[in-house]
Image (spheres, rainbow, N blue to C red):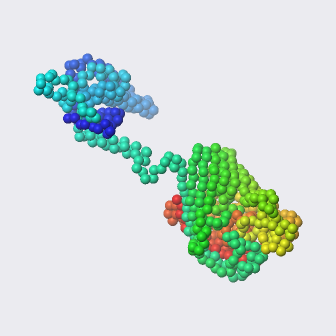
Amino acid sequence: MNHPISPSGRATPASRLRSLVTGSITVLVATGAVQAQTTPPAAEKKAPTTVRKAPRAAAAAATARRSAVAKPAEAAPRDDATAEAAALLAQIRKERQELEAAQATTVRLIRLMVEDGVIPREKAEELLPARDRGALADVVVRTPPAAAAPAAPATGAPATAEAAPPEKGVVRVPYIPEIVRNEMRDQIRQDVLAQAKAERWGDPGTLPGWMDRISFDGDLRLRYQGEYYGSGNTDPTTYYAVTGALRDGLPIGNTQTDVDGFRFRFRLGATAKVSDTFKVIARLATGRTPVSANPRLGQYGDPDGFRLVVDRAAIAWDPDPRISAQAGRIGNPWFWPTDLLWYEDLNFEGGAITYKPRFSSTAEGFFTVGAFQMELLDPTQTVRAPRDKSMLGAQAGAEWIPDRNVGLKVGVGYFHYDSIEGQRNTIAAPNANDWTVPPFRQKGNTVFDINAGTGQAARLALASRFHILNLSGALDLGHLDPLHVRLTGDYAKNIGFDRGEILARTGLDFEARTTAYQTMLTVGNPDVWGRGNTSVFLGYRYVEPDAVLDAFTQANVLLGGTNAKGYMLGLNYGIDTNVWMRWRWLTANAIYGPALAIDVLQGDLMLKF
């Protein structure tokens, strides 16, 4: 029987050959064709196959005899090692005999398939090693019944040895039994599925190749926040007049009335791998100030209430596993175990580079330097030269992990803020120093009116310079893993506060209050994103008014800023994979100045993807 196959659906020669070989062997064995050919015909007695089989059979017999002779000697080893070696040698000989027999059988089967016309001689020679191709030299191909020559036409023309040529676009193949067709179908299905999986055929999420280098991440946090004010607090008007305190960039408007509400934070980030060493990092987030990424729910009347801003836009360069650098609007590059200096959502605009030398198998160091621009003002009619507010920082430290149960990391840093202190205006130049007013601050830092004595509206600027020395550390003990005990701490001192310099510049005398420290003890599972993982924490915070810059520190204890002391108590619980809940109770009082006491209860539900 002939089966026409359209050229457009023709299988490749290699795949068709593989399927035919597999199927034909199965059919030949199943139908007894192999047994029928165990005695070769007379014409085959001098075939190279017969000549080559005898030496192989003789070799196999000789190997078997040697194995049999060797067995008595092996049966009585002098020791266990000799017995084991003898057994291994016998196993090797046995496997060699089986391999030789399998090779001889393979040659005979391929020879039979050539005789039956299942595969052409050329393809069969490709299947055999050079040493066995002589076995096909005298094979005579028998014409299969399906390919027999048709009867001679009625005109009496002699019959030909070949079948009539196929029609154009049609090829003829030998009849393929059902069992072979099933095996071919299964093999083709497996090959196609494997290729489709590798190349993602029909996958709705398939993207162009360049998209494979981009990954996305994000998180959403819903927060309940209760704010409870002390009964002895100073009224907000007086408190602002004395301290100049702000909240969310506006004069503080409440110091006595409890408030309950809900807030949220949403962030969506992307990382694009440009090359082996360069990446682009970008992120959008809610928020309107450096430390306020948590807009309140219920702000439908505020068109900016739910706006997204470019939270990060940076180029990352990692030329070596121990060197990394970023430039642009980047995440915090420093080691900061607490939020004494830096708010958790704070980003920096500039560049930083980190080097991590390896000291030993258990210790490595880190050294980070960075330069960041805080505000750049162009020249104006009153300010003839540009004014640049900036921060230069450097931090060095080391991390020691002697085993999986102990980890210690310490660092020392210096952060130098330039041109952020206020300068007084004069009647002759009433607006010349308006640029010294900070674009954003919270509460706590000492401020003064740069327009005092000019008859203009008050404008408050920072009294002190800020050159901050910082010591930080983190100790992790995991002897009861997955239960860990983690102790973190920060100490800061503003060595830029100069009482005499402030008096000369502002005409005011302020007392130096420039020390801050914070510590936190956490006990439990450090992975808060795992289902059922739990930890509890207790911390203490003490920050004098001019110890750190109030614009960049945390926004929760005493509702943000400096000039605060108090405790932090909380619980972390993993609700599900990538779902985490936290409850915190933050109680604090102002250290100096008008009375202010605020307790804050926060309940956070965080999901990340």
- Choose top left, top right, bottom left or bottom right for residue 171: top left
* Residue 27 versus residue 432 in the image, above or below: above
| 286 and 540: which is toward the camera | 286
* Residue 413 versus residue 226 in the image, above or below: above
Q: Which residue lies furthest to the bottom in this view?
A: 231
| 472 and 252: which is toward the camera | 252
Give the left or right position of residue 452, taking residue 204 as reference: right
Query: How many badges with numbers are in the image?
Result: 0
> Is any part of residue 101 visible from this angle?
no
- Residue name at image x 20 percent, y 35 percent: 1
> Is any part of residue 588 visible from this angle?
yes
- Choose top left, top right, bottom left or bottom right for residue 504: bottom right
Q: x, y (%) of residue 148? A: 19, 28
Q: x, y (%) of residue 510? A: 84, 70
Q: x, y (%) of residue 499? A: 85, 66
Q: x, y (%) of residue 459? A: 78, 71
Give the left or right position of residue 13, taking residue 167 as reference: right
- Choose top left, top right, bottom left or bottom right for residue 501: bottom right
- Residue name at image x 26 percent, y 38 percent: 180
| 239 and 534: which is toward the camera | 239
Give the left or right position of residue 315, taking residue 495 as reference: left
| 173 and 446: which is toward the camera | 173
Q: Which residue lies furthest to the top in this view?
A: 46
- Residue name at image x 54 percent, y 55 percent: 216
- Residue name at image x 38 percent, y 31 percent: 91
